[in-house]
Image (tube, rainbow, N blue to C red):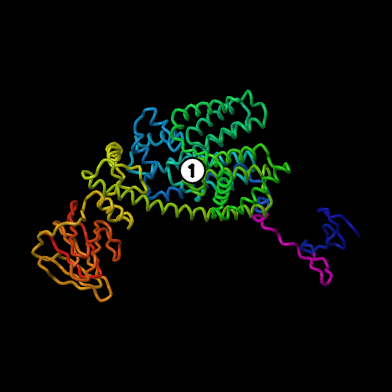
Amino acid sequence: MLVRSAAGGRVRGGRATTGGAPATAEGDPTPEPTTPGTDRRAPRAVPAWWDRARRFAGEPLSTRAAITIVVVAGLIAAVVLLRNYRDLIFFFDEWDFIQDRRGWGPDAFLESHNEHLALVAAFVYKVLFAVFGITSYWPYAIALVVSHLACAGVLFALLRSWSSNEVAVLGTTVLLFLGTGWGVLLWPFELGVTVSLAAGMGAILAIERRTPRGDVAACGLLLLSLAAASLGVPFTIGVFALMLARGGWVRRLWIVAVPAVLYGAWYLAYGAEKSSTKAENIPQIPVYMADAAAAALAGVFGMNPEIGRSILIAVAVATVAGLVGRWADRDRVTLVLLAVGVTWSLLCLSRFGIGTPAEPRYIYPGAAFMLLLLAALIGSRAITAPRARVVGIVLVTLSLITNIGVLRAGSAQWRDYSAQVQASLGAMTEVRDRVPDDFQPASQYGPQIRAATFFAAVEDLGSPAFSADEIRAGSVNARLAADDVLRRAGAITLEGAAPAPTGTRPPRGAVAADGTLRPGPAGCLTASPLPGASVIVNLDVPPAGLQVRSSGAPGSSPVGVRVVRYADLSPGGAAMATAAADGSVLRVTPVVAPSEWRLEAASAGDLVICGVR
């Protein structure tokens, strides 16, 4: 007999069932019979975290997540960059500002610098001079890093506007850690480039809003871009081209006309007479542009510019396909191509034969343009396919690894340059009363530095020069640079002279390599080489000086002489002066710090070293 239980099941023979399944006395369902060979086990449950990860991998990246990622990447980039500023100091063009732009007249701001209106850099440096002086480089490094982060932020906003959050995050991360552009990232003087690039991209964002406020902002940002560097010129042209393509440009012409007129007035007053543009460079433009594009694309991935040529071919094909197939935004692609084309053409006209387009300071803006071009080609397509995301992440990871390595190498190179400049300045400071006004202490890495203008500047701003102890603790190259300054300033003299009365005792502390030493003649030491070798003698220079000569005997050899104060004496180093084989005397006289010099004399024959009475 069949009855319904209180729970809604059926009761058969006193046993309740639910859902048609037999129940045990305890109310548990009994296992259903299975056919042999059939697996009735339930499928394994998928962990919740894996399910969430899978859904996340296939969903578009939210704006909030994209901003968070970029902010964190920016903070990490700031730390990485500032760590690489350790022991850096003012370099090349910065000395023009230190020595020649300390006034507050119009010329201090408007004077052309390598054909650029460097008003922004001049203003920033002058403010930092007034507040911090030049004893520390950190305030200037922080200013550059802040401007770089701002540039990356504007790039992120423009990439988001043109493409997707995924593209914006990947492209901005590349720029943040663009070690191939270390010539910009490690040189605060190039904040004009970062500011000009940021303002130019900001002008594009503003003009695309097509609102009165956006138009005013675009005009102001173009003015800022032009005031920072000549990158503002291609941006002004690019914005005008975008206005032409979008229509209604006549009533909005003032947006580009105001910056163009003001910049033109400045160029006629300050820039034209110092222009280095050469018409004979025009035929070189196509090749120069191809090299610049290859270098910029290679820089994005931290690769050699030669590899960038293959990438350039792929990007060129994609660009043509996008324009012909109408799947790319033609107006934006045209804007980028026009702006970057003008940039590289101007560089070729003024810098061809002077610098290559693969220089790090040119790669930075070029890479930003290439990232914009890629975003314009991709368009608003969100990268949601897991494989596409993996490829993008792998490419950016490889870019970060190589770019950070290039950044560290560039930092090490400039750290060596900085040490040499600081050591040279320290040595010049020691002999300040002996050097002429036009003396150049660091002609290789600071050719702008002149003794008179440098000392005038440090009276107001402090000095970044090394002390004597810092020179001694410096690198080999830094100590060599300091000794070179001291010799050129006359802190020690090495010159031919008539024999002078010798001391009553031979010079002390002499050590001979590959030869023997013996006293004589009076007040002198004679060194003789071992068979088939050249004798090398090291000894301290006494305050009264030394005389060095060959023995003058038949078969004598010239004597090469080196003298150092800070550097180490290394056997076989290049001679600074030579005593002839005929026994002519070379007089060594220390003038500054007379008890701190050491001499090395080397000859294939007998040589004689005498103290001076």
Task: Give the percent coordinates (x, y) of residue 355.
Answer: 47, 47
Amino acid at dot 1: Arg
Instruction: In the displayed orientation, state which residue is furthest to the bottom.
Output: 531
Q: Could you tell me which residue is drawn at 39 percent across and 27 percent down? A: 106
In this rendering, is residue 415 above or below 210? below
Q: Can you tell which quarter of the image residue 133 is in? A: top left
Q: Nearer the viewer, residue 316 or 216?
A: 316
Q: Is residue 173 visible?
A: no
Q: Nearer the viewer, residue 216 or 338?
A: 338
Quadrant of the frame with the N terminus: bottom right
Instruction: In the displayed orientation, state which residue is furthest to the top.
Output: 251
* Left/right of residue 297 with respect to residue 34 in the rendered view: left
Quadrant of the frame with the C terminus: bottom left
In reply to whether residue 113 is colored magenta, the answer given is no
* Left/right of residue 181 with respect to residue 606 in the rendered view: right
Residue that label 1 marks: 351
How many labels sit on residues?
1
Task: Give the percent coordinates (x, y) of residue 587.
Answer: 18, 58
Task: Give the percent coordinates (x, y) of residue 52.
Answer: 66, 52
Q: Could you tell me which residue is drawn at 81 percent across and 69 percent down? A: 38
Q: Nearer the viewer, residue 408 or 571?
A: 571
In reply to whether residue 31 is colored magenta, the answer given is yes
Task: Give the percent coordinates (x, y) of residue 157.
Answer: 58, 39
Region of the chain picked out in magenta, as a range:
30-51
Q: Nearer the viewer, residue 197 or 320?
A: 320
Predominant secondary structure, magenta span: loop
- Counting other residues with Cα less than 10 Å from the Cα at mark 1, is it few (<14), some (14-19), or many (20 or more)? some
Q: Can you tell which quarter of the image residue 501 is in? A: bottom left
